[in-house]
C-alpha cells in the first residue's frame, strides 16, 4: 500500500469513527429547541400559503386587459421555449404512472454487472457473456419497500431494513443498512429511476424514436445518448406511460454493442421464493461500518417478532414472548419493530438473564424489594413487548405474574439513613466527580464512576441503595431524602437539577464510609441512622402455583 | 389556469401531513448528529444549526419538490457546518477548535488512543475546511453521514461520476496535507 493510500485509509477510518460520536444531551436539547422554533415558523409559513390560496383579489378592468395580454405573451413564450424536452416529459409521465404501481418486475439479460461491494483481488466478470437478470421491487404490507435483484452470480436483497449482497462465485455476503428512507422515498421505484436516469441528466442528447408495437401494446420510444459512448433506448406504453423495454448500448471502436435488454411488467404476483428470500449463510460476512455485527442476531429476532404480529394481534398492554432457542442474542438496548413501533409505540426488551437481574435493574425504588434466592436464579429467555405507557414497575410485575410470581407487601423494622443538607451553594455539576479515579483500574472498585453524564441527588441516593443491595435482600441501607434539593423527573434528567457528573459505584461494606465522606464534602449532605418500621415488597410464588 | 408557482405550491400543500412532519421530522436526529460530528462544539453546532434551519425555511419549496428531500436537508446541514468549519480554519482559532467532545464512545481502550483519535479528527476536519465546497460536501456526506454515491449525486444535483471525482480530488488534497497521519510514519506520543 502506498503512502497516499495509507493516509487516505487513515482519514476515512477516522471519519468513520466520528459516526460513533454521541450527541451530548445538552447539545441535543439545545438543537431540539431550535427545531421547535423552526417548526413554529414553518407551520406559520404553511398557514400563510394556505390562506393565500383561498384569497382572490378582483383586478380592475384595465389591469384585466393588460394582464390578459401579458399572460398571452407569457403563454406563447412558454409553449415555444419552456416546453420540457422529450426525455424529461417521458420520465415525468413514467414517474407519475409508477405512483399507482405496487410491483415492478424486470427481466432480461446484461453483459455489465456492477457489484455493490467488492474486495481487493476481485476479478471483473467476463463482459462477453450474457447474464440473466431478474429484478423485483415492490411495497409489502408493512409499507416498506422490498428489492430483489439477481444478476448472474450476484443477488441483492433489501428487506426495508437491511440490504444484503450475496456473491455466489466468492461465497461472500455483505450487509448494510437499507436504502429505503421512508415514505417520501417510496414515491418512486429505485430500480426504475436508476435505469431511466439518462433521460433527465445533463450530458445526454435525447431523441424521439417514434412508435413501435410490442405484442398488443403500442409503445413510444426515446433515445438518450452520451458523448462518452453510452446509449439507452427506452420504450414506454403509449396508454399507461409505464416503461416496457429498456435497451442499453456501449460504444466500442465506433460500433454500438448492446449490453443489456430488460423487459418490464407491473403488479404481478411476487413468487414466494423471492418474497420470503433469506440470504444464504456463509462464513465470509462483511458488515458496513454503520452496522454492529454483535447486534445482528438481535436485529433478526426483532424482524421475527415483527413478522409474528402480522398474524397475531398486538397485546393490549404487554406480552412476554418465550424464545424457541437458547441461542445467546445480545441486545444492549431495547429494539423497535420495523412495521409496528412508529404506528403503535410497541417496542421490545430482550430478556436473556436471571430474573433477579431484571428485577434489580427495573424495580423502583431501589433497595425495597426482596427476592428469595431460588426465584433470583430463574432464567429468562424471553422478549417483553411493551410501550412507553408502561412503567418499569408495571413491567416487572407483568413478567413476574406471567411466570407465576407475585409481589406482596410486608412491614419490617429497617435501618435507614436520613439525609440532611447544610445549605451550602452546590458546585457546577460537571465539576463533581467520583471520589476514586478509575484511571488504569482493571475493574470498577468502590468510589469509582459507574455511570456519568449528569445525576440528580435522588439518583445518587437510589444508586447507593442499588449497589448496596445487589442480592435483593431488602435488608441493606436505604436513604430517606430530607435534603430539599430538587431532583425533578427521574425519567428526564434536567441539567438544572443535576448535582454530579459521575455516579459512583458503592458496592460492599467498604463503600459505606467512602460514600458518607463524599456526600458531605461534595454537597454538604450528612446522614443520621434511624430504625423505622417500613413497608417492603416481597416477591413470592402465587398462592396455589407450583 | 394556475401559474407554475401556484401549481408547485398546490403540490406541496396538498399533502395531509404538515411540511415539518413530512420533510423534517424523519431526519431530525440525523441533522443534529451530522452537525455535531463535524463541529463538536456546542456553540458552533448551535450557530451552524440555526443557519441550516434558516436556509431550509428559505428553500422549503425546492426541498419539498426534491426527490429525496431528507438528503437535501442533510446537505444543507453539512454545508452550514462546513461554513463554520471554514471560518475557524481561516481564523486559526485552534483553541476553540480543539474543544474536546464529551460524547466519544467509551469503547476506545486507552485515554491515549482516545486523545490520538481526537487529535486526528481535529486535523482532518481542519483539512476538510480547506477543500472546495463541492468536495467538502461530497466528502462529509459520504464518510461522515455514510450516504451512498447515488444519493449524494441526487442531493448535489449531479451524476455519480461527478461525486466520485469530487471525492477523489478531495482525497488527493487531504492525503497531501495529512501525509503525516500515515500510520507507518510512527505513532504519536503514547509514552
Image (cartoon, coloured by chain):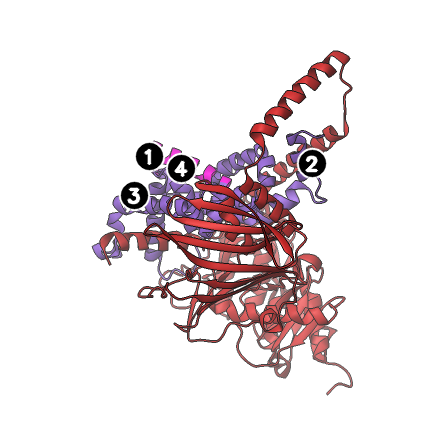
Chain colours: A red, B purple
Q: Nearer the viewer, mark 2 or mark 3?
A: 2
Q: CA distance from mark 4 to mark 1?
A: 19 Å
Whether the residues at callouts 4 and 2 have beta carbons within 8 Å, the answer is: no
Mark 3 vs mark 4, CA separation in Å: 13 Å
Quick one: label 4, few (<14), some, or many (20+) residues within 10 Å? some
Q: Quadrant of residue A117?
A: bottom left
CA separation, marks 2 and 1?
48 Å
Which residue is drawn at the image coordinates 37% and 43% (left, top)?
A: B166
- Residue B92 tag number: 1
Residue A248 position (above or below residue A86): below
Find disc 3 in the rendering and name its residue: B173
**Residue visible at 52% across and 59% down?**
A262
* Residue contact between numbered discs 1 and 3, judged by CB atoms under 8 Å: no
State whether discs 2 and 3 lie on one chain: yes
Give how far apart the Cα atoms at labels 4 and 2 are.
Answer: 33 Å
**Same chain for marks 2 and 1?**
yes
For marks 4 and 1, the one nearer the N-term is 1
Dot 3 falls on which chain? B
| Element assignment for label 2 | helix
Q: Are marks 1 and 3 on the same chain?
A: yes
Q: In the rendered structure, which segment of residues is drawn in magenta?
A: B76-94
Residue nearest the viewer, comparing A296 with A454: A296
Q: Which residue is mark 2?
A: B10
Residue B95: percent from left, percent from top:
35, 38
**Residue at the spot of label 4:** B133
Amino acid at each position: 500500500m502506498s503512502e497516499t493510500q495509507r493516509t487516505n485509509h487513515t482519514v476515512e477510518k477516522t471519519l468513520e469513527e466520528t459516526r460513533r460520536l454521541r450527541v451530548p444531551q445538552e447539545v441535543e436539547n439545545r438543537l431540539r429547541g431550535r427545531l421547535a422554533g423552526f417548526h413554529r415558523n414553518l407551520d406559520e409559513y404553511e398557514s400563510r400559503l394556505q390562506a393565500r390560496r383561498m384569497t382572490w383579489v378582483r383586478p380592475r378592468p384595465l389591469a384585466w386587459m393588460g394582464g390578459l395580454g401579458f399572460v398571452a405573451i407569457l403563454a406563447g413564450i412558454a409553449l415555444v421555449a419552456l416546453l420540457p424536452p422529450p426525455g424529461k416529459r417521458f420520465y415525468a409521465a413514467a414517474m407519475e404512472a409508477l405512483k399507482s404501481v405496487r410491483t415492478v418486475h424486470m427481466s432480461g439479460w446484461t453483459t455489465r454487472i456492477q457489484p455493490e461491494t467488492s474486495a481487493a483481488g476481485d476479478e471483473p466478470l467476463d463482459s462477453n457473456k450474457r447474464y440473466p437478470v431478474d429484478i423485483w421491487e415492490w411495497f409489502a404490507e408493512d409499507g416498506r419497500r422490498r428489492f430483489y435483484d439477481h444478476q448472474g452470480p450476484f443477488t441483492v436483497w433489501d428487506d426495508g431494513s437491511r440490504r444484503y449482497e450475496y456473491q455466489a462465485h466468492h461465497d461472500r455476503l455483505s450487509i448494510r443498512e437499507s436504502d429505503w428512507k421512508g415514505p417520501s422515498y417510496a414515491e418512486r421505484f429505485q430500480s426504475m429511476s436508476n435505469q431511466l436516469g439518462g433521460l433527465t441528466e445533463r450530458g445526454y442528447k435525447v431523441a424521439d424514436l417514434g412508435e413501435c408495437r410490442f405484442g398488443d401494446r403500442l409503445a413510444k420510444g426515446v433515445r438518450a445518448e452520451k458523448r462518452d459512448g453510452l446509449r439507452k433506448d427506452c420504450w414506454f406504453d403509449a396508454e399507461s406511460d409505464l416503461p416496457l423495454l429498456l435497451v442499453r448500448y456501449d460504444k466500442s471502436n465506433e460500433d454500438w454493442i448492446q449490453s443489456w435488454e430488460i423487459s418490464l411488467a407491473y403488479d404481478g404476483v411476487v413468487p414466494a421464493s423471492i418474497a420470503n428470500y433469506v440470504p444464504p449463510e456463509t462464513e465470509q460476512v462483511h458488515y458496513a461500518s454503520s452496522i454492529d455485527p454483535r447486534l445482528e442476531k438481535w436485529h433478526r429476532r426483532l424482524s421475527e417478532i415483527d413478522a409474528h404480529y402480522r398474524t397475531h394481534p398486538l397485546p393490549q398492554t404487554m406480552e412476554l414472548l418465550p424464545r424457541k432457542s437458547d441461542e445467546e442474542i445480545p441486545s444492549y438496548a431495547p429494539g423497535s419493530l420495523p412495521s409496528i413501533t412508529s404506528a403503535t409505540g410497541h417496542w421490545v426488551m430482550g430478556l436473556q438473564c436471571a430474573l433477579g437481574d431484571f428485577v434489580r435493574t427495573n424495580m423502583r425504588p431501589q433497595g425495597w424489594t426482596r427476592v428469595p434466592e431460588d426465584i433470583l436464579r430463574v432464567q429468562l429467555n424471553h422478549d417483553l413487548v411493551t410501550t412507553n405507557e408502561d412503567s418499569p414497575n408495571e413491567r416487572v410485575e407483568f413478567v413476574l405474574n406471567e411466570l407465576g410470581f407475585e409481589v406482596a407487601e410486608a412491614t419490617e423494622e429497617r435501618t435507614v439513613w436520613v439525609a440532611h443538607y447544610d445549605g451550602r451553594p452546590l458546585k457546577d455539576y460537571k465539576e463533581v466527580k467520583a471520589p476514586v479515579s478509575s484511571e488504569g483500574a482493571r475493574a470498577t472498585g468502590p468510589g469509582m464512576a459507574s455511570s456519568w453524564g449528569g445525576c440528580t441527588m435522588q439518583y445518587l441516593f437510589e444508586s447507593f441503595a442499588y449497589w448496596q443491595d445487589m442480592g435483593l435482600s431488602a435488608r441493606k441501607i436505604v436513604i430517606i431524602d430530607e435534603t430539599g434539593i430538587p431532583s425533578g423527573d427521574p425519567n428526564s434528567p434536567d441539567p438544572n437539577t443535576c448535582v454530579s457528573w459521575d455516579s459512583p459505584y458503592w458496592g460492599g461494606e467498604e463503600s459505606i464510609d467512602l460514600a458518607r465522606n463524599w456526600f458531605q464534602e461534595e454537597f454538604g449532605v450528612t446522614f443520621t441512622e434511624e430504625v423505622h418500621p417500613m413497608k417492603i415488597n416481597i416477591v413470592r410464588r402465587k398462592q396455589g402455583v407450583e | 389556469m394556475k401559474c407554475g408557482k401556484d401549481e408547485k405550491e398546490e403540490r406541496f400543500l396538498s399533502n395531509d401531513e404538515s411540511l415539518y412532519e413530512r420533510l423534517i421530522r424523519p431526519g431530525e436526529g440525523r441533522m443534529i448528529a451530522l452537525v455535531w460530528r463535524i463541529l463538536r462544539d456546542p456553540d458552533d453546532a448551535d450557530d451552524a444549526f440555526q443557519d441550516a434551519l434558516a436556509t431550509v425555511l428559505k428553500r422549503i419549496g425546492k426541498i419539498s419538490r426534491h426527490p429525496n428531500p431528507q438528503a437535501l436537508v442533510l446537505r444543507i446541514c453539512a454545508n452550514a457546518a462546513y461554513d463554520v468549519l471554514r471560518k475557524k480554519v481561516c481564523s486559526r482559532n485552534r483553541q476553540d477548535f480543539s474543544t474536546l467532545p464529551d460524547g466519544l464512545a467509551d469503547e476506545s481502550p486507552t485515554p491515549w488512543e482516545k486523545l490520538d483519535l481526537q487529535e486526528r479528527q481535529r486535523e482532518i476536519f481542519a483539512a476538510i475546511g480547506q477543500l472546495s465546497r463541492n468536495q467538502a460536501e461530497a466528502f462529509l456526506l459520504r464518510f461522515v453521514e455514510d450516504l451512498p454515491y447515488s444519493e449524494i449525486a441526487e442531493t448535489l444535483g449531479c451524476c455519480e461520476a461527478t461525486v466520485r471525482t469530487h471525492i477523489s480530488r478531495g482525497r488527493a488534497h487531504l492525503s497531501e496535507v495529512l501525509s503525516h497521519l500515515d500510520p507507518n510514519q510512527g505513532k504519536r506520543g503514547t509514552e
